Image: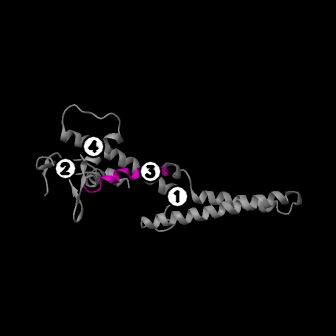
Amino acid sequence: MSKLTTTKTADKSLSVLDCIVAYVDQMAPETYEVADDCTCTPSAAKYSLSREAQIMKDARRELEAVRKIKAMEKFFLSASKKLDDLERELKHAREAFEKCLDHFCMPHGSMETDQFFCVLSEFFDSFDKAIAAFEVRQRQLFNPGPQVRSGLFNPAFMKQRRESSMSFNSTAGGAMLKKPSFNGARPSIFGRMRPQKE
């Protein structure tokens, strides 16, 4: 994943991730908001299912040690039931994580949950930074004047630009994508004007 940001173009001005963001901007700008659907990844990166499983295993062993103590019988039954519920939840979490690995074509056991979500969280951070850098380049292309965006990431500006980047006109055959006009040319992240495709 780190190679997306460290692999550069020949002139070192753009990374692979910068090029991906530029492509996404042209083809699927709504993808910019993918991180909004994964706000739990930083928290998920702090937990390991294997570590939680070991904690429950230790708790089960300690619980079995008090099973024969008559005075602890009521406690044992109550704690055992709660531990059973936690183990079922852990099993469901493991199955859900394995489906997540399947989605990314990764073999089960190849990564732990904390490692996986840490990589994902770092990607979203890098993706947001690449979007911010792309927006700065676009502003410079549209208007090279002294317009400087405050902050690294301005969601309001990005939302406005995404909404204006494409519109849908209803036609007899359905909805037709209409790209904005730039007087016959379209700005490129590579610093030149691209001819507008008809």
Nearer the viewer's eye, disc 4 or disc 3? 4
Q: To which residue does mark 1 refer?
A: 113
Residue 29, magenta (yes or no): yes
Where disc 4 sits, the SS reads helix
Q: Which of the marked residues, 1 or 2, is nearer the chain's N terminus? A: 1
* Along the line of sight, the residue nearer the viewer: 169 or 58: 169
- The relative height of residue 129 versus residue 111 in the rendered view (above or below) is above
Q: Which of the marked residues, 1 or 4, is nearer the chain's N terminus? A: 1
Q: To which residue does mark 4 refer?
A: 135
Residue located at (19% from left, 41% from top): 142
Bounds of the magenta span? 26-41
Q: CA distance from mark 2 to mark 4?
A: 17 Å
User: Given the image, on which type of amino acid does mark 1 rest?
Assistant: Thr
* Along the line of sight, the residue nearer the viewer: 75 or 167: 167
Q: To which residue does mark 3 refer?
A: 121
Nearer the viewer's eye, disc 2 or disc 4? 2
Query: Quick check: marks 2 and 4 in contact, CB under 8 Å?
Result: no
Side of 127 relative to 175 (left or right): right
Does the rendering let one see residue 124? yes
Query: Quick check: marks 4 and 3 in contact, CB under 8 Å?
Result: no
Q: To which residue does mark 2 refer?
A: 180
Where disc 2 sits, the SS reads loop
* Along the line of sight, the residue nearer the viewer: 196 or 124: 196
Nearer the viewer's eye, disc 1 or disc 2? 2
Does the rendering let one see residue 62? no
User: Given the image, on which type of amino acid does mark 2 rest?
Assistant: Pro
Q: Residue furthest front?
A: 172
